[in-house]
Image (tube, helix red, strand yellow):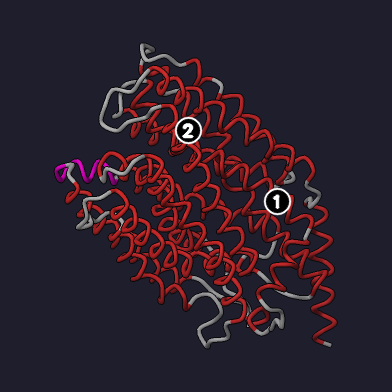
Amino acid sequence: MAAPELTFLRKSIYSLGDFTVNTVLSSLGLIYVPFYLIQVAGLEAWLAGLVPLIGRVVDAITDPLMGRISDMTRWKGGRRRPYFLIGAIPLGISFALIWMEPPFVGQFARFAYYTGAYCTMSVALTILSVPYLALLPEMALGYDARTSLNTFRNIGSLFGVFAAISIRPVANALGDGVADFAAAGVLFGVLVSLPWFAVWAATFERPEFIGRMTQESLAEGLRTVARHQNFRLLVGMYLTGRIAMDLMSALLILYFTYWIGRSEDFEIAMVLFLGTVMLALPAWLHVARTRDKSRIFAFGTVWWMAVSVLFVFAQPDWPRWMLMVIPPLAAIGYAVVDVMPWAMLGDAIDEDDLVSGERREGLYNGVFMFLRKLGGALAVFLLMGILDIAGYVKGTEQTELVQQTIRILTMVAPVTFLGVSVWFAHEYPLTRQAHHDISRQLDERQREARG
């Protein structure tokens, strides 16, 4: 039986999964940790930064484990898709809980509540996101088909960022208090639950993939993945780029609030930024049809590095339009750094299949998803720690040292990690031609297996 066609509608519905995932993850990096936990919930900056870092310790176990579980699942409904129905409602409930006011006064008691709610939400997200991402290289088999489906997925993720940055305005419209953020959390909890039922209905799994069993334990699988040289290069490229993305995301709200002095400009800048990313993605997809993904990644990264330098020169007395030019320019390069590593992951999985005869989409995507969340947590934790040392105090006029620290970090922090990412991209050998050869050998092996 032939697999369903990847139509525009099917790819669009599939992208709703990343809409919910990125609504959650972006709200954590943009609003929840740098703003809500400090300004609204009243946690000290270093405790606020520690919340997601503890969540990543949990993810270090649950993300790869969920990947292996989905690889080994043999339900009638498939290996991946049933988990969309299992995890949808728990994600919505747990997302609402992280915005609730705990009945505690002390710093550490409140920290314990928010950490527990955060970890619960993270596990629910893992149940959904790892099988969801593992479906992508199975639904889209070709080099360009994966880039196309990943582009749709990234457009969905951008709408998720739009949703995330609207949490604060929604809470402000309700009254701007702790209870109003809790009400907004309930609304957005519903928003991140419902799309999964549509994703479940629109996605598919290939029978020839479902029937391939693996005998490896989780530990053995992780060792195999860790020995995969090209995957290690891809991890280096992705993780350093991801940290740069999350650092910039966390810094922008602080940059416009404390350096520029107009907090309300943050949402305007993000709308312009995300709108430009959406416009840039189809253009990059067109370019990717004739060029290697790693080269496109390197070019976009260098572009973003060059534009980021402008942040350190911008002054509070600049006309607003001049400031609003910088985020869209950076967005052109950001779009590539965001989409290409995920489009390249399926190629690395195919290479592993050729060498080992195993399909480990779940495990590979579990590791990748953990790294995505780990990068953000490390970035925010280090950022909050630096600001704490500089003297950052909530609800007051910040000192000159804090303002200058925020200003410099907005340029230096992303550029440093992006520079490392370019080096990894330069060393990456899985080109278009290399993947074509891998696909040809996989097809030949499959034909021989059929007799």
Q: Residue at 14% of width from left, 43% of height from top?
A: 175
Above or below residue 82? Residue 105 is above
> Residue 140 at x, y = what percent?
63, 64
Q: Residue at 25% of width from left, 31% of height from top?
A: 395
Task: Write down the residue under mark 1.
Answer: 234
> Residue 341 at x, y = what percent?
64, 50
Above or below residue 329? Residue 47 is below
Q: What SS does tag 2 mark?
A: helix
Quadrant in which residue 446 is drawn: bottom right
Q: Is residue 342 left or right of residue 202?
A: right
Above or below residue 241? Residue 344 is below
Q: Nearer the viewer, residue 102 or 280?
A: 102
Residue 170 covered by magenta stretch: yes
Q: Crowding at label 2, few (<14), some or many (≥20) Cα neighbours within 10 Å?
A: some
* Residue type beneath disc 2: Ile
Number of numbered discs visible in the structure rendering: 2
Q: Is residue 373 left or right of residue 344?
A: left
* Residue type beneath disc 1: Leu
Real-space CA distance between mark 1 and mark 2, rounded to the nearest whole angstrom? 29 Å
Task: Write down the residue under mark 2.
Answer: 386
Q: What SS does tag 1 mark?
A: helix
Residue with the most extreme top position: 317
- Magenta stretch: give its range: 167-175
